[in-house]
Image (cartoon, rainbow, N blue to C red):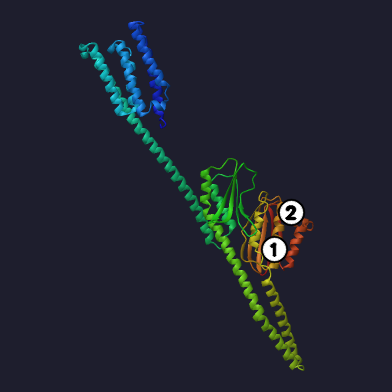
């Protein structure tokens, strides 16, 4: 099996092949001029020409083989010396051709075979000269050609050795360069992952690990590491994937990369990146490596949400049980005691008035306890933060882009949460359908029975005083706010509109 020849061997082979044909033409021409058209000149021309034809017809990888190259070199020396013997020995015009086998052996068969071929050619030439005329061994032309054979053998063998060393050095440098580039790319990927991990650590050190902030930070770091025109990040939820971050709305693209966010065997979300040209395999691995911290962050968020949900449910059940089993009976017993006292002192009107007031307060308190127990055992409260995240994910291919920075300490009671969630949805819907807005932001703070939520857009706005009666959506939002005892406010200008709902002591 033959290896692929280096570039320098291919070029040198073409030059040496041209030299063979030129040596044949030179030898044939001057042999005809010197001796005429004789049997000897014809035989020499035929032998050399046939050798060159056979030599050139062999594939280059065969000619450059170690053993085949040696056989061809020895055969070439034999053919050349026959032609020299037939056409004037040391004065033969085929002496130039006799150099080519030595050159080939030195250049392609190696140092040892090159020297051996040079010595073989020199020895045969000396033998031919001695057979023709022993006194001719002292002639200068004979030893000049012997020196040429040896010089070519040594020079080209050494040149081949240097070229092989240079090729090996170049290959080693290319391998080292590729390895260095690979290590550099890996360092860049690790640096990008480290930056994202640092950003996520800063978010985790804050008041809350918000999936929207995590997704936004991930997209920002991906944009600095991989080229893409559109992207979105989704987190798994009990109701299916929820898009927590995305870039500006863009048209469809030809190439899409979808990378899952996983922790172990559990999928916690996915990332979708799009652009006009395909993603390379190294870019895919780069994205997967960068997103590993995001998967861990989403897994922690889901775990914290599950723990918080379980803790809240258990605490609600405990409080409901305590109110029902301990405080409720105690209040009922207190009411019964007040009734007994009033029956025992029917003639004391002043005392009866005080006792009646106390009895009424106890009755009201019992009703409040019952309502509280019913509320605690009712459906779990509506998380306004989760509702805001859902609004951010709705209709991702349409403007405006919805973002949220809503902070929620404890979800509001069910009756408040449902109404405020409806107000948020209506405000976002109005911005999307009527305001020609590009961005909607949901801000505020929620702490159970107290809270404030603002929905702000950058749309065209409207005249609140002039157009208020025609905006039935606003009328409905105000009615929902009044239903929970909240305060509703709308402020609008050509730069945008802000809808605010407050409840409790805020």
Q: Residue furthest right?
A: 469
SS at circle 1: helix
Q: Residue at x 35, y 29 (%)?
A: 66
| Residue 382 rendering spot, x and y as whole percentages | 67, 65
Residue in the foreground of this view, choosing between 149 and 271: 149
Residue 314 lies in quadrant? bottom right
Q: Is residue 113 left or right of residue 7?
A: left
Residue in the foreground of this view, choosing between 109 and 431: 109
Q: Which numbered disc flags the more N-terminal residue, 2 or 1?
A: 1
- Neighbour class for label 2 at 10 Å: few (<14), some, many (≥20)? some
Q: Which quadrant holds the C terminus? A: bottom right
Label 1 sits on residue: 420
| Residue 321 rendering spot, x and y as whole percentages | 64, 77
Residue in the foreground of this view, choosing between 240 and 107: 107
| Residue 424 rendering spot, x and y as whole percentages | 69, 59
Observer able to see residue 96: yes
SS at circle 2: loop
Label 2 sits on residue: 462
């Amino acid at each position: 099996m033959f290896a692929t020849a280096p570039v320098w061997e291919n070029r040198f082979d073409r030059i040496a092949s041209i030299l063979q044909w030129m040596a044949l033409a030179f030898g044939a021409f001057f042999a005809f001029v010197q001796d005429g058209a004789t049997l000897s000149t014809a035989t020499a021309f035929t032998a050399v020409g046939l050798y060159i034809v056979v030599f050139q017809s062999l594939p280059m990888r065969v000619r450059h083989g170690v053993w085949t190259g040696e056989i061809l070199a020895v055969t070439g020396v034999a053919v050349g010396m026959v032609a020299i013997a037939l056409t004037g020995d040391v004065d033969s015009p085929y002496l130039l051709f006799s150099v080519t086998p030595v050159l080939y052996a030195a250049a392609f068969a190696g140092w040892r075979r090159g020297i051996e071929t040079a010595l073989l050619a020199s020895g045969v030439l000396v033998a031919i000269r001695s057979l023709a005329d022993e006194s001719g061994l002292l002639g200068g032309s004979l030893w000049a050609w012997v020196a040429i054979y040896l010089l070519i053998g040594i020079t080209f063998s050494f040149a081949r050795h240097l070229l092989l060393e240079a090729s090996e050095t170049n290959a080693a440098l290319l391998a080292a360069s590729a390895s260095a580039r690979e290590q550099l790319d890996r360092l860049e990927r690790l640096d990008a992952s480290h930056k994202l991990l640092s950003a996520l650590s800063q978010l985790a050190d804050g008041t809350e690990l918000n999936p929207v902030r995590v997704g936004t930070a991930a997209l920002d770091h991906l944009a600095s590491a991989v080229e893409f025109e559109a992207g979105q990040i989704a987190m798994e939820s009990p109701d299916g994937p929820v898009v927590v971050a995305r870039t500006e709305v863009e048209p469809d693209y030809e190439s899409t990369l979808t990378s899952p966010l996983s922790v172990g065997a559990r999928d916690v979300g996915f990332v979708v990146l799009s652009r006009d040209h395909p993603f390379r395999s190294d870019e895919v691995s780069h994205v997967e490596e960068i997103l590993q911290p995001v998967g861990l962050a989403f897994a922690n968020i889901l775990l914290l949400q599950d723990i918080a949900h379980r803790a809240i449910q258990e605490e609600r059940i405990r409080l409901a049980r305590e109110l029902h089993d301990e405080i409720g009976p105690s209040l009922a017993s207190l009411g019964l005691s007040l009734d007994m006292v009033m029956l025992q002192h029917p003639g004391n009107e002043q005392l009866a008035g005080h006792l009646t007031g106390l009895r009424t307060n106890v009755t009201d308190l019992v009703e409040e306890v019952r309502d509280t127990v019913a509320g605690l055992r009712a459906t779990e409260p509506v998380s306004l933060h989760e509702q805001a995240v859902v609004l951010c994910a709705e209709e991702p291919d349409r403007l405006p882009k919805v973002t949220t920075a809503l902070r929620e300490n404890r979800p509001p009671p069910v009756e408040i949460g449902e109404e405020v969630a409806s107000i948020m949805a209506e405000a976002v819907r109005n911005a999307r359908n009527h305001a020609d807005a590009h961005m909607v932001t949901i801000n505020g703070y929620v702490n159970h029975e107290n809270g404030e939520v603002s929905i702000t857009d950058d749309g065209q706005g409207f005249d609140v005083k002039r157009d208020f009666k025609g905006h039935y959506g606003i009328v409905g939002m105000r009615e929902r706010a009044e239903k929970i005892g909240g305060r509703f406010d709308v402020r609008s200008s050509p730069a945008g509109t802000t809808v605010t709902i407050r409840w409790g002591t805020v």
